[in-house]
Image: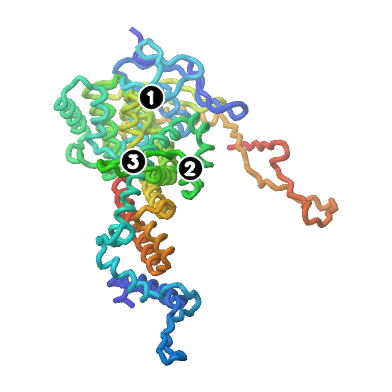
Amino acid sequence: MPPILEINNAAKSFGRGNERSTILRDIHLSVEEGNFVSIIGYSGSGKSTLINLIAGLLKADTGTVKMDGTDIKGPGPERGIVFQNYSLLPWLTVTENVRLAVDQIYPQLSEEERAEHAARYIDMVKLTPASGKLPRELSGGMRQRVSVARTLAANPRILLLDEPLSALDALTRATLQDEIADIWQQNRTTVVWITNDPDEALLVADRVIPLLPGRDGATLGEEIPVNLPRPRDRRELLGTPEFKDLKLRIVNTLLAAKKGSIPLVTKKLAPPDILPEDLAHKRHFSLFDRPTPRRRSQLQREELKIEAS
Amino acid sequence: MKLFHSLKLDYILLPLLGLLLCLGAWAFISGKSTTTTSVDDWGNPVTKEERHGIARNLPSPTETWTASKPYIEEPLAKRGELDQGILRFAWLSLKLVAQGYFIALLIGTPVGFLLGLSKNFTKAFDPIIQILRPVSPLAWLPLGMVLFSGLKVLDADGRVSFGTSDAAALFTIAICAMWPTVLNTAVGVRAVPQDYLNVAKVLKLSRTKTLFKILIPSALPYMFTGFRLSLGIAWLVIVAVEMLIGKPGVGGFLWQQYNANSFAHIILSILTIGVIGYVLDRLMSVIEGRFRTA
């Protein structure tokens, strides 16, 4: 039986010609049904690109992204995604946002059954008292809960979470981490969770895979299995030597990768578009044929290379 | 000074002050009449009325008020086709504006959606729109007359109930008022956040569902800004249209009174147009505010 999600030798670049930059290269990933995988990496290293490849919102340039052994051709509800910025529709209430997904996925159910289904997921994320509110009346944590409920209500086979908690404060974040881990404990969907926080990755995942930045695109590093017992209690776990060891391993891997790859940043600077006047040139005063300033853009293009440390 | 602010008197007193200053300026430049009575060679008394002042023929505020009184005190009177109470005129104008505006929205909104959704449609039609947009209503009206020449809809008594000039008027209002709706709708559709579209993609919403559940609600605030601007233009155009085709209404009344040398009524018409325009704009912005999301 093929793994539920399999990425083989995938690469993704953006831009054209000289501006083309490779974001991801040589991506290999295999996720078994029921796995909880966390991908950890620096901001801007291509984590969101990776999850968009899995979701089908982007297409890989080379290599294959397969679900159940067949190529992923586009986005679909079987791969539910929770976006970093919640992506709730601001004109719909909590219930209506969840209903949007429920109505779409279960057209065969009756009105009451769909309402009940939506209510169950809203209850699962503990938002029943706020079910009639609009997203703008909710806090960041509550909004992300709605987003989780909406995604889960569509009954996805793979749950993709793109830095779902990074916009939240530390306390709300901790609560939501525990809640999402609890929900997973109950229905054991396959989860790919993208994060930039080692603690978060260790608290929720079975496997932590670092996304290592490189000179020409990021690639996945060696997997770090997390064999901590579940349910994981944050207060007990944070002090244990196993947890500290694992955290150190993750941090060291990421730091080493960053050190090993001195990223060559090509920055386009925009110098003023006027060249200094040539004083050696003799000028005649003329009313109609005034000399115009010389423009840098009329010259050939200049590029400055700056080595970032 | 404290009392002044605490009672929000500055919101009442300062506008009043501004109004008084403007009235003062008006009174200053307007003409005054003096009546001189003299005795002619045969011993009969002769009264001679003379107007003088900076703008001799401009009626003063008090003259305007006296002349306008019958129209304001009996706003719904109908003394003749072109001699009606001011609210009755306003109602006639508003009816025409409403029809033209409705046509403008009916055509403008879908065109705006096409512009916002399709790059090729934009490439094809944006130049034409940009050229037609600044054309004045005065230029469109004759074209409307040509377009609908010979059009006649008769009512039961055999009178023309909807003729060429009515069609041309609606055409002019619609085509002038359409552009803000078209352009704002297009901007609103282009501004729909990619996140919302991603949600639609992941849920595999159909095209119609994406349109009605994502695109329209998301673009609605922009669309309403367009609707409001369109209504403002429709109300601007009505005056020009009524002047040209001589339909009864505020604009028609203004032009007729100018031709009748009854200058005070011009000012009455201008103020009526202004007040109604303001009220319409307020109404629309209240509605606009209700649809503002996020």
Quarter location, residue A97: top left
Q: Secondary structure at mark 2?
A: helix
Residue highlighted by disc 2: B143
Q: Nearer the viewer, residue A28 or A133?
A: A133
Residue B117, how many percent across, how many down? 43, 31
Give amino acid for label 3.
Leu
Q: Earlier in the sequence, mark 1 or mark 3?
A: 3
Residue highlighted by disc 1: A208
Residue B177 seen from this side = no
* A145 lies left or right of B100: left
Give amino acid for label 2.
Leu
Residue occupying the far top of the picture? A1
Residue A223, how many percent across, how many down? 41, 20
Q: Secondary structure at mark 1?
A: strand
Residue A59, how many percent across, how many down? 46, 20
The numbered dot on residue B130 is none
Q: CA distance from mark 2 to mark 3?
A: 61 Å
